[in-house]
Amino acid sequence: MNIIIDANIVFSAVLNADGQIGDLLINSNMFTFIAPNFLRHEIHSHYDKLMKLSQLPLSSIQEAEYHVCRTIAFMSENTVLPLNWRFAVNLVSDIDVKDTVYVAFAKQFGGLLWTGDKRLIRGLLGKGFRKVITTDALFALRESLNK
């Protein structure tokens, strides 16, 4: 099952690699985690914020990033078909345009968009886009698949 990961999920995992999100990313082999290459840029551009929030040095942030991101298949945004870009732009233009790439990936790769962004979740569900999953729902899904 393809799971598209957005930036807030990776940020949460980097800040707490031993937490629920980190556990899902690092130890779950039943999902294929996919993210746009842009996500790497987002992580790097927020190193200062991550260091401030975690009170950790850059080297520790980078080590956590490595462990979290090694299970993610990073893919070029060029792999998304124009019709999926248009779909995503139309869907998120009045929610948050920064999330366009994640919705386009969910559409392109037939996966669920894993996000902790409540505004995005409400907005997408309100527009009938059901290919979105929260951390709690993904954790429950993993548990049910393990039975």
Image (cartoon, helix red, strand yellow):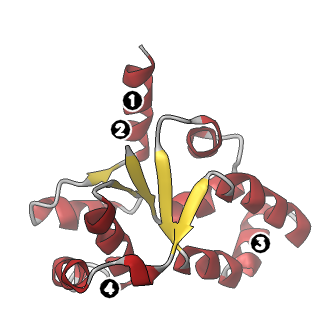
Going 56% across and 36% down the picture, which residue do you hit?
28
Q: Residues within 10 Å of mark 4 (few under 14, many from 20)?
A: few
* Residue with the mark numbered 2: 137
Residue 115: quadrant of the picture? bottom left
Kindly identify the amino acid type of the residue bearing the numbered disc 1: Ala
Going 39% across and 23% down the picture, which residue do you hit?
145
Label 3 secondary element:
helix
Q: Residues within 10 Å of mark 2 (few under 14, many from 20)?
A: few
Query: Residue 113: image x %, image y %?
Result: 35, 58
Between the residue at mark 1 and the residue at mark 3, the CA separation in whole angstroms equals 32 Å
Q: Are marks 2 and 1 in contact (CB under 8 Å)?
A: yes
Closer to us: 32 or 14: 32
Between the residue at mark 4 and the residue at mark 2, the CA separation in whole angstroms equals 24 Å
Residue 83: assigned label:
none
* Residue with the mark numbered 4: 97
Q: Are marks 3 and 4 in contact (CB under 8 Å)?
A: no
Going 52% across and 58% down the picture, which residue do you hit?
9
Q: Using residue 30 as the reference point, say whether residue 57 is left or right of it.
A: right
Count of number-bearing discs: 4
Q: In the rendered structure, which disc, 4 or 2, sits on the residue that comes first in sequence?
A: 4
